Image (cartoon, rainbow, N blue to C red):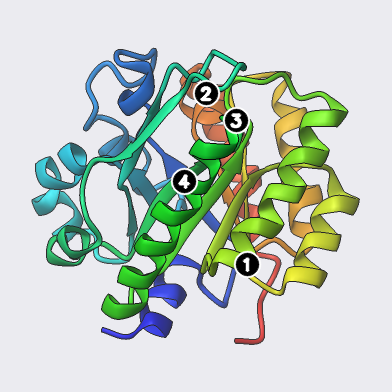
């Protein structure tokens, strides 16, 4: 398979992608809505999502399900990060599987955190690790979704600006897709226009009324992002409101096409 084939499966040209992340167990252990880690797939697969962001365990446990739903894409999380609540540089990051294993499992893309609240020495080690993963992705023709993030930090203006800077470092390292928490419509548009790398926007934890989630997605799409990563803002709501939010997001994502 080619890089372009996997990119178009992950980020289709005829709509904005809706990728539902369900990989939170790598950091949060047992989390509300994911008590049974394989339960989101049958619950949401037919609700107009385009794919899921998953752990290695979920990929292995759901092989038959995804064989019956080949239109859904799978993005494999290949790393983890602990002590993320500490903002003093004491976090620890590492890979949990390899790019080669991801290709063997038949997924469409791999995803990796790019945390930046760490010491300068750890930042260099982090960039070195990312560089090796990107080289492996290029060798195996599978895209890397790289996520610049200040782990555990409140969404202050300072943090938003810092994550935007780290997104540019992700570009320079060679990320194929950049995933970032929504920095606002204007900043998203600038990143899309300047970096010219597909941008996907993370929805983050459950917060606010359904209308706030929908408006954030609308701003994301207006700014030119190729995908929305929406998980907890869907599956941690009550089923009725959750379905309504996802249906409206799907309507918005289908109103945009890309000239690929």
Pointer 3 or 4: first along the chain = 4
Residue 40: quadrant of the picture? top left
Where in the figure is residue 224, as x and y percent of width and height? 76, 65
> Callout 4: few (<14), some (14-19), or many (20+) C-alpha neighbours within 10 Å?
some
Where in the figure is residue 29, as x and y percent of width and height? 30, 16
Residue placed most toward the observer, 30 or 258? 30
**Is residue 252 among what the camera can see?**
no
**Residues at marks 1 and 2 touching, judged by CB atoms closer than 8 Å:** no
User: Spatial distance from mark 1 to mark 4, Cα to Cα?
Assistant: 14 Å
User: Spatial distance from mark 2 to mark 4, Cα to Cα?
Assistant: 41 Å
Disc 3 target residue: 204
Residue 66: quadrant of the picture? bottom left
Pointer 1 or 2: first along the chain = 1
Q: Is residue 190 left or right of residue 52?
A: right
**Residues at marks 3 and 4 touching, judged by CB atoms closer than 8 Å:** no
User: Spatial distance from mark 1 to mark 3, Cα to Cα?
Assistant: 25 Å
Disc 1 target residue: 172
Mark 2 against mark 4, which lies toward the viewer?
4
Name the element at disc 1.
Answer: helix
User: Spatial distance from mark 2 to mark 3, Cα to Cα?
Assistant: 20 Å
């Amino acid at each position: 398979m080619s890089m372009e084939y996997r990119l178009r499966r992950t980020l289709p040209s005829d709509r904005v992608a809706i990728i539902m992340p369900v990989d939170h167990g790598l950091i949060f252990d047992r989390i509300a809505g994911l008590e049974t880690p394989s339960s989101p797939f049958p619950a949401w697969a037919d609700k107009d999502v385009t794919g899921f962001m998953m752990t290695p365990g979920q990929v292995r446990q759901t092989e038959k399900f995804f064989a019956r739903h080949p239109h859904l894409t799978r993005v494999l999380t290949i790393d983890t990060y602990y002590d993320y609540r500490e903002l003093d540089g004491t976090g620890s990051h590492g890979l949990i599987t390899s790019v080669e294993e991801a290709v063997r499992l038949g997924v469409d893309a791999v995803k990796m955190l790019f945390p930046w609240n760490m010491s300068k020495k750890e930042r260099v080690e982090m960039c070195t690790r990312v560089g090796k993963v990107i080289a492996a992705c290029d060798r195996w023709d599978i895209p890397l979704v790289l996520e610049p993030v200040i782990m555990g930090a409140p969404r202050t203006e300072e943090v938003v600006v810092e994550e935007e800077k780290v997104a540019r470092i992700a570009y320079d390292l060679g990320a194929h897709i950049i995933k970032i928490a929504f920095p606002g419509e204007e900043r998203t548009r600038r990143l899309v226009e300047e970096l010219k790398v597909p941008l996907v926007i993370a929805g983050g934890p459950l917060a606010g009324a359904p209308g706030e989630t929908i408006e954030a997605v609308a701003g994301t799409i207006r700014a030119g992002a190729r995908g929305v990563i929406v998980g907890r803002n869907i599956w941690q709501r009550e089923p009725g409101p959750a379905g309504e939010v996802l249906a409206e997001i799907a309507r918005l994502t289908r109103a945009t096409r890309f000239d690929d």
